[in-house]
Amino acid sequence: MRVLCIAVTIFAVGFTLHWLWWRVRIPRRQSATLLVIFSGTLVAGLVALSLHAADGEQRFWVLRNAWEAAHVACFCVAAMLAYVVAYSALEERSPSMTILTRVADSGQRGQSREELQAMLLDVSPVEVRLAAMLRDGMVREEADSAVLTPKGWAWANTFSAWRRLLRFRLGG
């Protein structure tokens, strides 16, 4: 339980840093910045908590051995990656999130199917995601085409490998 508390605290510190940073200025490359914040927080936390172990005193927040540090690191990396994936889905509004938000904002009145369809005509999820991929340097535009950059190829190959490993069929 102690190790879990340490891991959750390190992740919470990273989340707080992310929240504060976004209150000041939202970075251009949000996913990369999140990875830097959470990774840096993890490394700083592991170093700080391991240095406290050197004085020999048994404190609650001290990592006592490499096994505990590995557990904290595994938890934090898994939480970081899950958060970055969830954040990228929320970063730009998906049609589902747009509908949920609109219906929630309308309260008891609700929204008709026609109102929702009219609202979604103004939202192009493909354009939004393409703009995000251009911004993040995953694709570049060449003569009316989107072309993968080396970073885009790396991500595409990673996803393809996972799909093959999990035996997923092609598709969305």
Image: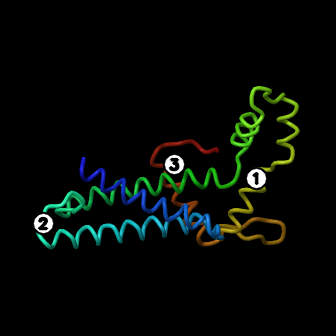
Kindly identify which residue carries mark 3. 163
**CA–CA distance between discs 1 and 2?**
56 Å
> Of label 3 and label 1, which has the lower sequence position?
1
Q: Identity of the amino acid at label 2?
A: Glu
What amino acid type is highlighted by mark number 1?
Val
Above or below, 141 against 100 in this view is below
- How many callouts does the rendering have? 3
Q: Is residue 2 above or below residue 55?
A: above
The residue lying toward the viewer, choosing from 16 and 72, is 16
- Residue drawn where x is 65% and y is 55% of the image: 91
Amino acid type for the residue under numbered disc 3 = Arg
Q: Nearer the viewer, mark 2 or mark 3?
A: 2
Residue 161 at what x, y percent from top left? 49, 55
Seen in the image, is 85 located left or right of residue 101? left
Q: Residue at x 88, y 38 (%)?
A: 118
Which numbered marker is on residue 30?
Answer: none
Residues marked 1 and 2 touching at CB (< 8 Å): no
Disc 3 is placed on an element classified as helix
Query: Which residue is tagged 2?
Result: 57
Which of the 4 quarters of the picture holds residue 10? bottom left
Q: Residues within 10 Å of mark 1 (few under 14, many from 20)?
A: few
Q: Which residue is mark 1?
A: 126
Instruction: Tell me which label, 1 or 2, sits earlier in the chain.
Output: 2
Residue 99, compared with residue 112, is above or below; it is below
Image quarter where the C terminus lies is top right
Label 3 neighbourhood size at 10 Å, few (<14), some (14-19), many (20+)? Answer: few
Looking at the image, which residue is at 48% across and 60% down? Answer: 16
Q: Secondary structure at mark 2?
A: loop
Q: Residues within 10 Å of mark 2 (few under 14, many from 20)?
A: few
Residue 140 in percent (x, y) is at 72, 71
Return the disc, 2 or 3, that comes first in the chain's sequence: 2
